[in-house]
Amino acid sequence: MAIVQVPPDQIYSTTLADIQPGRYVCKDVHAAGQDAVRLKRLGVCQGRTIELLGRGDPMILKIGTSRVGLSRQLAKLVLVDPASVSPLNPESAPVSVPASAL
Amino acid sequence: MPGSDATATKPVVLLVGNPNVGKTSLFNALAGMRAKTANYPGITVDLRKAMIDVAAVDRDARCQATSQIELVDLPGLYSMETASPEEEVAARSIRGEFQGELSRLPDAVVVVVDATNIARTLVLAGEILDRNLPTIVAVNLIDAAESSGTEIRFDELSEKLGCPVIPVSARKARGLGELREAIYELTKPAKPLLPIAREPCVAGCGGCPFAARFEWADGVAGASVRQTPGKGVKLEWLDRLLTSQGIGLVTLLGVMLSVFFLIFSLADLPMSAIEDGFGWAGRVIDNLLPTGPLSTVLWLPLATGISLSVFAVAYWLNETKWTRWSTSVAVLTSLVIGSLPLEDFRSLAIDGVVGGVAGVVVFLPQICILFFFITLLEDSGYMARGAFVMERLMRRVGLPGKAFVPMLSAHACAIPGIMAARTIETWRDRLVTILVLPLLTCSARLPVYVMVAALLFGDSPWKASLMFAGAYLLGLLAAFSTAFLLKKTVVPGEAAPLVLELPNYRMPSFRNAWFTTVERATVFLRGAGTTILLISVVLWALATYPKLPDDRTFSSDREQAQAALEYSFAGRCGQMVEPIFAPLGFDWKIDVGIITSFAAREVLVSTLSIVYGLGEDAAEEPAGLVETLRRQRRPDGTLVFSTATGLSLLVFFVLAMQCLPTQVVTKRETGSWRWAVFQFIYMTVLAYVAALIVYQSLSAAGYA
Ligand SMILES: Nc1nc2c(ncn2[C@@H]2O[C@H](COP(=O)(O)OP(=O)(O)OP(=O)(O)O)[C@@H](O)[C@H]2O)c(=O)[nH]1
Ligand SMILES: [Mg+2]
């Protein structure tokens, strides 16, 4: 199982796997290959607002008007910030992990 | 100018859209043909095509221009970046990468979007529009959107998208005329060859292309959709219950048990009606066939003709082409059949053909009922929740949650189960599911279970039901552990982690369920029915030839039948393999049953009743058969059907692969005989070893 280690400079962002229900903004998706495609085309991709409806494995997300079930294993690869953080000022947000960190 | 394009190939129009937006429903509404429709992402796999008339809607009907187009229903697609074999099919059709008429770019694309979920379903439309194909956006499910208070400004939407936007409702047949007209306008013969100059939907610079598309779709939808607040059903509380750990699982078990209860309680009547019907047909044929001596000159062409017409019907059902090869097979076989003695012909027609076909058709009611309820459940959106709940359990053995629908179906018959496995996206997960499905107890095993239960526990109903539950559990357990092992060895890798859209709950449509049921039943009859016909004729031949020498006389017909079977190929094979099955506690007569049931397991009961000298009819009244079986003794005086032998036989039938039609379907769905052979070998070995352990340990414990 590909567990992504979150480097210390990423401390502001948490993954979807360890947050409370609420609204979040997706910062980055660290999945690769097919998993990345499967996540992104259902709307789990950078800059989208994601609402966590129910925790658990799998968990339930609300993305736009559709609901999506997502396994914890993939949720660990999705970095999110609370929705209140202004997405208009990307400079103040931590730099995202380069792909090589995977 | 009608008719001018009659000779040219017809324009090809593709129906494209996310899973579950109603493409197939729309296709059916336009084409009047019934394809599989269901509320479960990614159901359609076969491409369905139909010629339809499209026309300009004109005030004057006399000079109304019409033309024909070929409409193709594609599998659901989330994005041109694909993640499953079916999506790949859809994406490649759009890119024109197939043979035949799909080898060039489509003449037009109808992108179907869901009016209740515009923003998400428009994402794909953006991708298609960027390919600069002639595009129409059909906004389906407007009936559902209206009743939930969603207002859509279609001209606004059309302006933003730069293409025609047609509101439709496939279920209520609304907007179909306008859609036909739009297709006509886009594909009409004298189309001006203007290059399509559209603004790209997404500026092509940096960032996640998906994110940009979603943003674009959100923008478009935001500008043209208004949601009346407070209106529409909010079913989030229901979703929370149905997907929760405890209640969700209990509900799922409840739903599954009720489906089974319905299958078995509702199917009883039609099943006995079918049995009676075939029995009656057999008698009619018996009476129709002449009894006395008949001149060969007359009989040969007649019998050959009858046989040829059976072939014709089978080929037609199975869609076999009359090639040189298949024609010579039919003609030669018919000639052989024509030259059979009259009595043999009678037995072939009644026992081989009518009996064999009856053996399959009798399962049809169960399969129809299964499909009917599964389609209703899929339509309502519940099945996605079921997959969600099962994900937690199935993952442990390396299967995805989506494997639960195939597993549910396989409890009626493995064939629809294997076909339902197409909803599983990842190839390896799908393969493992297909490989283990035939271990689940299908209804063809039930006659065998019933026989063993009556044999061993006839006096104690609760022991019998315990045995039944045990057999079901054994099948489930075997399927799960095999899946686990396969995922560790032959097809390594964990199940692809779940990302599943939970579709909105919808009112299921009985019409839709009915048409799906009819279609599935036809597929089943075509595939399984014709294969079974072939098998039953071959089996009949094996059990009939060589014939007993004429000089032997018997005191009764039964004894003669018994001796004839013993003398036949099947009987000889049974005696030959006796040493192999002896450690399982089977004598050669049971072995004959095992051999004849390799193609179709339910044959065991009728074979046993012949080998033990009861004749065909006894199989219909189990009491007689069971009494006779109970009395059988081995040469050394011990009982043949001891507890050990009975349970060993049961275990063997729970686990063994004894169904040729299933193997054919496995081959078709996996694309090679390799997996069908693998399935056959592993299941047979498993069955043998398990039955061996059961017999040996029980007889060591004194139950022999
Ligand atoms: N209320 C309503 N329901 C509809 C309409 N069109 C389709 N449906 C329902 O939507 C569900 C999905 O329809 P399908 O036609 O199978 O959808 P599809 O796009 O072919 O789905 P896939 O083949 O899985 O990609 C079914 O339950 C239909 O009954 C409509 O106009 N109104
Ligand atoms: Mg479809």
Image: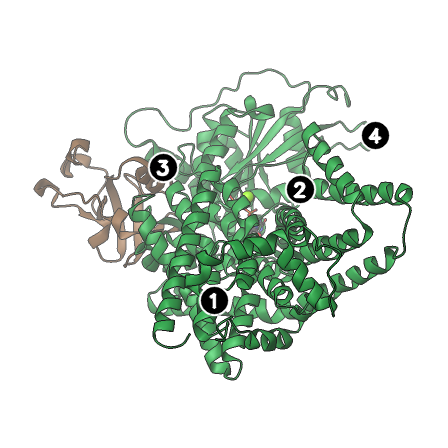
Tag 3 or tag 1, which sits nearer the N-term? Answer: 3
Q: Which mark is residue B314?
A: none
Q: Which mark is residue B62?
A: 4
Measure how far apart labels 2 and 4 are at the Cα level.
43 Å
Name the spot of residue B36 as percent of width and height, x first.
59, 47
What secondary structure is found at the residue carrying circle 1? helix
Circle 1 or circle 4, nearest the eye: 1
**Residue topped by disc 1:** B650
Asked if badges 1 and 3 are on one and the same chain, I answer: yes
What secondary structure is found at the residue carrying circle 4? helix
Circle 2 or circle 4, nearest the eye: 2
Q: Are marks 4 and 3 in contact (CB under 8 Å)?
A: no
Letter of the brown chain: A
| Residue type, mark 1 in image | Leu
Q: Is mark 1 within 8 Å of ligand 1?
A: no
Tag 3 or tag 2, which sits nearer the N-term? Answer: 3
Q: Residue at x 65, y 19 (%)?
A: B191
Measure how far apart labels 2 and 3 are at the Cα level.
49 Å
Q: Which mark is residue B318?
A: 2
Q: Is mark 4 within 8 Å of ligand 1?
A: no
User: In the image, B292: left or right of A78?
Assistant: right
Q: What is the chain identity of the residue bearing mark 1?
A: B
| Residue type, mark 4 in image | Arg
| Residue type, mark 2 in image | Asn
Measure how far apart labels 2 and 1 are at the Cα level.
34 Å
| Residue type, mark 3 in image | Glu
Tell which residue pokes out farthest to the left in this image. Answer: A8
Chain B representation colour? green
